[in-house]
Image (cartoon, grey):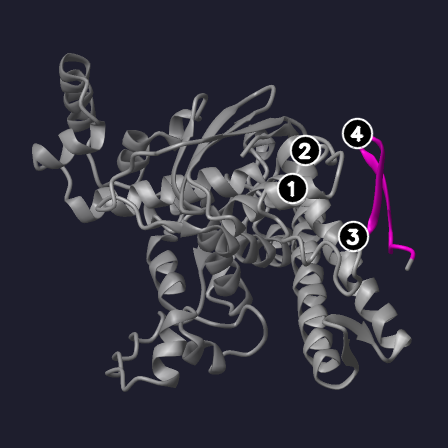
């Protein structure tokens, strides 16, 4: 699959959607002026994310040190071993007993997810998908579904503005207010059914006891509250919690809104720290565009299949072995929906090849539509003419 272009034409979400939908395996190379990132996919799922210019604090070893999981001295010792043996740093740390395999997996998974979500803030850059086998350690990372990335992106876009209004700087600190948090309720044994669904979607039972969008005080809030000591900054809390920037900041906002924490604004040079969160506007535009197209495609396919079944059963007659519609209005309705389906296939072809096909038969050769779909509900194929690499005309046949 040839997939190459600029992010002005197709955003990160569009690309992830296409690769995930077609369950492709390979590496997506992304480059901007400041950074170069390589995302590995296995059957459409993300299994690795490498940055050629990753910030120092986003390096695996630094993340472990900042999270107080690994002493700096141990990291330096492991790095010396890495220079001599060229082994992976994580393997060295586990083999020497400096960290556990579980701690390594948790930190690596966090590093990958944080790298991916920062991509959605990119406004310019280039992309190229290189299809082929990829290597990854299934014991180190659980594959991340591409559609899950889109849904999580929407959640972050919706909630980041409210978070940033209160948690505005990584240098901000907090003071505790009121009584300590009550003990965490004992976990109920799972009995299947709704309880399992609650667990799968992040503890919906806890949310039912809250008031307002950010009133829930769950495990993340308890973890962050214990870390929010006087003088400890937001960035330090993010690092120590190992929840990631978004989840840690959301938990802080919940605690502020429930009057458990009082934010203390940074002063002097600390005010010039980095801005928290993604570029909400660019992410919303790109995710909205991708998910809207995904939804429209599903609607078109559903309408076509539904109408085909209905008209096959009630309005299509057989004359001399050929199928004809007894209701021309029904035929027109199906043709409109089928044309929209062909439009979608043409858009996918352009995304893969960089231009529209010269004939509709190329859609069949690309595995996007069958010959029957290129003519249904007519005996002849739709009229198609490419007026330019990025333009075309599509009309029903004259019968």
The answer to whether the residues at label 1 and label 2 have Cβ atoms under 8 Å apart is yes
How would you rate the neighbour count of disc 4 (Cα within 10 Å): few for under 14, some for 14-19, many for 20 or more?
A: few
Q: Where is residue 54 in the image (x, y as percent from the top left)?
A: 43, 26
Is residue 395 highlighted in magenta?
yes
Q: How far apart are marks 2 and 3 (CA)?
A: 40 Å
**Where residue 389 is drawn, which disc sits there?**
4
Q: Residue at 30% across / 34% down in the picture?
A: 135
Q: Check residue 123 in the rendering and tell me which mark sits there, or answer none.
A: 2
Q: Along the polypeptide, which appears first: circle 3 or circle 4?
A: 3
User: Looking at the image, is mark 3 or mark 1 nearer the viewer?
Assistant: 3
Earlier residue among tags 3 and 1? 1
Q: Mark 3 points at which residue?
A: 381
Cα separation, mark 3 vs mark 4, equals 21 Å
**Which residue is depicted at the point 76% across and 61% down?**
338
**201 over 165 or under it: above or below:** below
Q: Residue furthest front?
A: 320
Classify mark 1: helix, strand or loop: loop
Residue 231 seen in render: no
Position of residue 249 measured from the top left corner of the image (x, y, whole percent): 49, 52
Q: Mark 1 points at which residue?
A: 279
Query: Which span is picked out in magenta?
Result: 382-398
User: What secondary structure is found at the residue carrying circle 3?
Assistant: loop
Question: On residue 186, which mark appears?
Answer: none
- Crowding at dot 1, Cα within 10 Å, few <14 / some 14-19 / many 20+, comes out as some
């Amino acid at each position: 699959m040839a997939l190459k272009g600029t992010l002005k034409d197709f955003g990160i979400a569009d690309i992830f959607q296409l690769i995930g939908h077609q369950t492709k395996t390979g590496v997506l190379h992304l480059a901007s002026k400041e950074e170069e990132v390589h995302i590995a996919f296995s059957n459409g799922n993300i299994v690795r994310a490498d940055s050629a210019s990753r910030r120092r604090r986003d390096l695996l070893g630094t993340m472990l040190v900042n999270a107080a999981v690994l002493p700096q001295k141990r990291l330096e010792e492991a790095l010396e071993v890495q220079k001599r043996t060229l082994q992976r740093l994580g393997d060295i740390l586990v083999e020497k007993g400096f960290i556990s395999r579980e701690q390594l997996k948790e930190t690596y998974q966090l590093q990958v997810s944080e790298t991916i979500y920062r991509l959605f803030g990119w406004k310019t850059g280039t992309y190229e998908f290189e299809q082929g086998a990829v290597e990854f350690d299934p014991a180190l990372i659980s594959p991340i579904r591409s559609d899950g990335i889109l849904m999580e992106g929407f959640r972050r876009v919706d909630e980041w503005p409210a978070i940033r209004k209160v948690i505005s700087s990584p240098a901000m600190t907090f003071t505790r207010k009121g009584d300590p948090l009550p003990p965490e309720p004992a976990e109920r044994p799972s009995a299947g059914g709704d309880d399992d669904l609650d667990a799968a979607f992040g503890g919906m039972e806890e949310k039912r006891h809250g008031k307002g969008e950010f009133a829930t005080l769950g495990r993340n809030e308890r973890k962050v509250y214990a870390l929010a000591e006087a003088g400890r900054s937001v960035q330090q809390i993010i690092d120590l919690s190992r929840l990631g920037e978004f989840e840690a900041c959301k938990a802080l906002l919940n605690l502020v809104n429930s009057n458990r924490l009082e934010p203390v604004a940074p002063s002097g040079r600390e005010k010039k720290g980095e801005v928290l969160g993604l570029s909400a506007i660019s992410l919303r535009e790109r995710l909205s565009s991708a998910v809207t197209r995904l939804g429209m495609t599903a609607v078109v396919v559903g309408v076509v299949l539904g109408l085909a079944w209905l008209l096959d059963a009630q309005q299509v007659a057989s004359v001399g072995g050929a199928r004809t519609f007894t209701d021309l209005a029904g035929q027109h309705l199906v043709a409109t929906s089928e044309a929209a389906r062909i439009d979608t296939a043409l858009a996918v072809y352009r995304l893969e090849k960089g231009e529209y096909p010269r004939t509709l038969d190329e859609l069949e050769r690309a595995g996007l539509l069958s010959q029957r779909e290129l003519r249904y509900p007519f005996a002849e194929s739709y009229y198609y003419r490419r007026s330019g690499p990025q333009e075309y005309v599509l009309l029903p046949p004259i019968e």
